[in-house]
Image: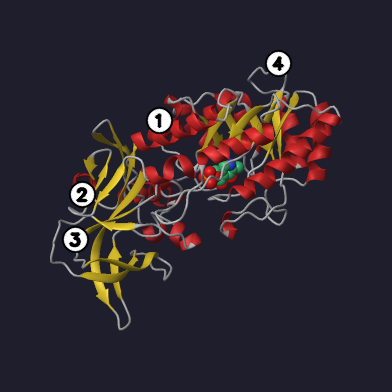
Amino acid sequence: MRPDINYNPQNKDLEIGGLSAAAIAEKFGTPCYVYSANAIQARLKTLQRALGAAGIGERTTICFACKANDRLGVLAEIAALGGGADIVSGGELKKTMSAGIPPEKIVYSGVGKSREELQSALDAGILQINVENGQELKLISEIAKSAKAHKPHGTGISLRYTPNISSDTHHKTATGHTENKFGLSEHAVTTLARTAKEAPHLRMQAISIHIGSQIVNLDNYDTAFQKLRALVDKLAEEGITLSHIDLGGGMGISYGRGTEIDIEAYTRLIARHFGDTDHKLIIEPGRYLVAEAGVLIGKVLYTKERASKAFAILDAGMDALMRPALYDSWHDIVPLHAPDKDAPLKTYDIAGPICETGDIFGNARTLPELRPGDRLAVLDTGAYGATMSNRYNARPSIPEILVKDGACRLIVQPPSIDDIIDAERKLVFESRVKT
Ligand SMILES: Cc1ncc(COP(=O)(O)O)c(C=O)c1O
């Protein structure tokens, strides 16, 4: 069940943190994203409790994969409950630190970190950098000499291991196979671990994995953890002892119709594989913490009848929410319009305004008959929603609202189309500097 987001089919309204979604949309306009702070807190506490129950709470740092949702208002909720962050860019480093997440709880993943980004991470003195290849390790070693943060034992290095398994998830979100661009083979990890161990200014600290996203079948983790443990033990036999093990993220949710990961069983699984070691553990959940805490609200602009089907065209499209177009992903879609007991049910393809055939949030959705002006909420869009949005078709990004303690607050007000044009106009027509 979604924490703190309740749909009442009788009065056809959605309540977010006890507030009416229709009223929020009325106040801020559509399209908009709305998040519940309580829902984020509830998920984080559930995970913390499950880690505690498995006996690994004290030694596990939850590093929220902020690519799922990097809004300061959201990150501040994570920070307040003691959460850390998994980042993949210099921008995410700045955002997480601005939101109050301490550098000692930040790990830096990502397959293409630039020199400047690495420099800022080393200067900040973050917990660990998850290295993806030998060239990157060499670069970090160079930069570490002059890093501003004083790390008496050197910068913490983790090597990202690809356990070479095919996870049960969409092929575009599977990352645990050597066919994908992420991570290092067992051989490469072993070789680079020897290099990192000897490198001045570096500390060979951890091995990390991340086998993919939206994983609900624990067998995938079981296999990956087993391979990871074998590798950690093999390195220890060589004298390369690690202080940390980073298990990545990927914990899946139900999206309203499937099963979600059994989080207690997941934490017990971690304890089964790593409970007898004294390593500190890191996990990097993204979606699990925030997906169900967010909804995208759009308004019906038009309905359109075709010979074979009907469309409802919304003012929100794939520029705001990419997931259905990118992964054919399912999101529940619910109407927010006033109750009309006599409204017949009708089946629609729910489409956006973007000039792409793939700009569809859901096919063949049966809803009370829609009229222009009716509002619909697309559920479970708190993860990989706003952060993946773009300005295609010269459509500005949309406002984002956080509900907390019975009140709602604008947390993101993106630049308007006039702001965007002004900025471009200054460069194109008013700047005298030619390069
Ligand atoms: C390295 C890494 N860690 C964690 C995550 C978070 O995944 P999820 O949101 O599925 O938990 C990702 C997602 O792509 C990732 O690449």
Residue at the disc numbered 4: 152
Residue occupying the far bottom of the picture:
307
* Total residue callouts: 4
Q: CA distance from mark 2 to mark 1?
A: 24 Å
Mark number displayed over residue 22: 2
Q: CA distance from mark 3 to mark 1?
A: 34 Å
- Asked whether mark 2 lies closer than 8 Å to ligand 1, one says no
Residue at 61% across, 54% down = 174
| Within-10-Å neighbours for mark 3: few <14, some 14–19, many 20+ | some
From the viewer's perspective, is 50 left or right of 56? left
* Place of residue 167 in the rendered image (x, y in percent of width and height, measured from the top left): 63, 54
Residue at 72% across, 51% down = 164
Q: Is residue 73 above or below residue 291?
A: above
Point out the tag, 2 or 4, that comes first from the N-terminus. 2
Residue at the disc numbered 1: 77
Ligand 1, seen in the image, is in the quarter at top right
Q: Is residue 280 above or below residue 305?
A: above
Q: Is residue 132 visible?
A: no
Using the rendered view, name the quadrant where residue 122 is placed: top right
Q: Are marks 2 and 1 in contact (CB under 8 Å)?
A: no
Mark number displayed over residue 373: 3
Using the rendered view, name the quadrant where residue 201 is placed: top right
Q: Nearer the viewer, residue 57 or 78?
A: 57
| Within-10-Å neighbours for mark 2: few <14, some 14–19, many 20+ | many
Callout 3 amino acid? Gly
From the viewer's perspective, is 354 left or right of 6? right
- Asked whether mark 4 lies closer than 8 Å to ligand 1, one says no
Point out the tag, 3 or 2, that comes first from the N-terminus. 2
